[in-house]
Amino acid sequence: MTFQYIFGPVASSRLGRSLGLDLLGSAICTFDCLYCEVGRTEKLTLERKPYVPAADILAELEAWKRANQDLALDYVTLGGSGEPTLNSEMPAIIDGARRILPGVPVAVLTNSALMTDPEVRAELAHADAVLPSLDSLRPEPLATLNRPNPRLFAGGQQAVGELAEALVTFRKEFTGRLFLEIFLARGLNDSDEDLELFKAYVPRLAPDRVDVVTLSRPGAYAEAQPATAETLQRWREALCPLCATPQDAGPRLGTAPAAHSATRAAAPQAVQDAVHASLKRRPQTATQLSGALDISREHIVSALETLEKQGHIKRRTEQDGEPFYGVRH
């Protein structure tokens, strides 16, 4: 069975085996980030509305549960093709997911753009874990890297400061887990000045974890280039010990080990469906797909070959001699 708004489960370095829910259905976002793995934003907006109705997502989740009774999950994660907080029915989706899959915590990914809205913060507080991103504490790198809706950060440094303070306010209101992600792009937001600002900010935010990451697959725009390994290491060594629960933060490579060790078996059509659904969200290599979906690389390669012959996917750039695959649009 194929699903329109459910993808995975995928193996996440932060959340274990995570089932994804797409709250937008297409690339609808507050940002048009240079590095976005989904691709270029189709609708750059701040308007909140039920882009995908909660009833549609929860009906799919009920069907997914019936078809996967024996599959253990560590998290249900709200994310997908755009910024999930733009969906005004997010609280109903969080509460519905918790009802359908009792005992499975719910996480929300967010780019933090709407955190200054008290209503959004209150809605996010329904979740068990929130994973906000914040790529700089200066307006110039944010404008260049995140390419926000023009109404965002129009106030320059004051607006960026208000966003950063809104995250701190949310942290005080929120009783769940908070994982901060900082994406570095070479020459754009990886300066010593940027690092010093975060060294002062992270202790105030007191996240449970900080992940400093960079590009590991093709982004939306060629201007985004990965930060060096040395830069990543320096930032991680400086920021990770400042968390409420200090720990190492590894690179986001899409190849994190699954939380459940047995590679799951699946019929060829089921593998093809899972691969196609995953590639709709971001381009990946066979190795990345195997790690994320917990399916043997042999079965992944077979599915990729079939999907490519059928014209559903195409090869893109290569990394270390291994091609990335993405869906045809």
Image: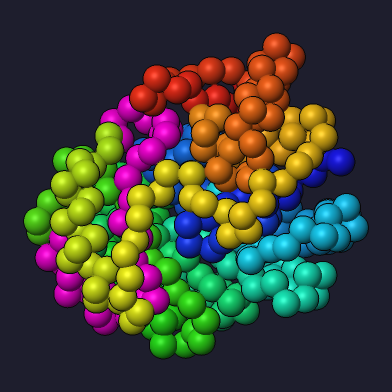
Q: Is residue 209 above or below residue 63?
A: below
Total marks shown come to 0
Q: Position of residue 22 (x, y in %)?
A: 66, 51
223 part of magenta stretch: yes
Task: From the top left corner, tell me how far across and down residue 203 is, in percent.
Answer: 24, 80
Q: Which residue is rendered at x = 33% and y = 27% of the image?
A: 222
- Whether residue 119 is visible here, answered yes or no, is no
Judged left or right of residue 3, residue 122 is left
Can see residue 68? yes
The C terminus is located in which quarter?
A: top right
| Direction from residue 141 to residue 6 in the image, left or right | right
Q: Check residue 146 for magenta coloring.
A: no
Q: Residue 328, how many percent across, how many down?
A: 63, 21
Quadrant of res 265: top right
Q: Report the side of 261 relative to 236 (left or right).
A: right
Res 64 → quadrant = bottom right
Extent of the magenta region: 195-224
Which residue is outermost to the top?
309
Q: Residue at x 58, y 67 (%)?
A: 107
Q: Residue at x 32, y 45 (%)?
A: 214
Question: Where, quadrant-wise, is the N terminus in this rendering?
Answer: top right
Between 143 and 21, the residue placed more toward the observer is: 21
The colour scheme used here is rainbow
Q: Position of residue 207 (x, y in %)?
A: 36, 76
Residue found farthest to the front = 262
User: Which residue appears at 12% of the width and 65% of the height?
Assistant: 196
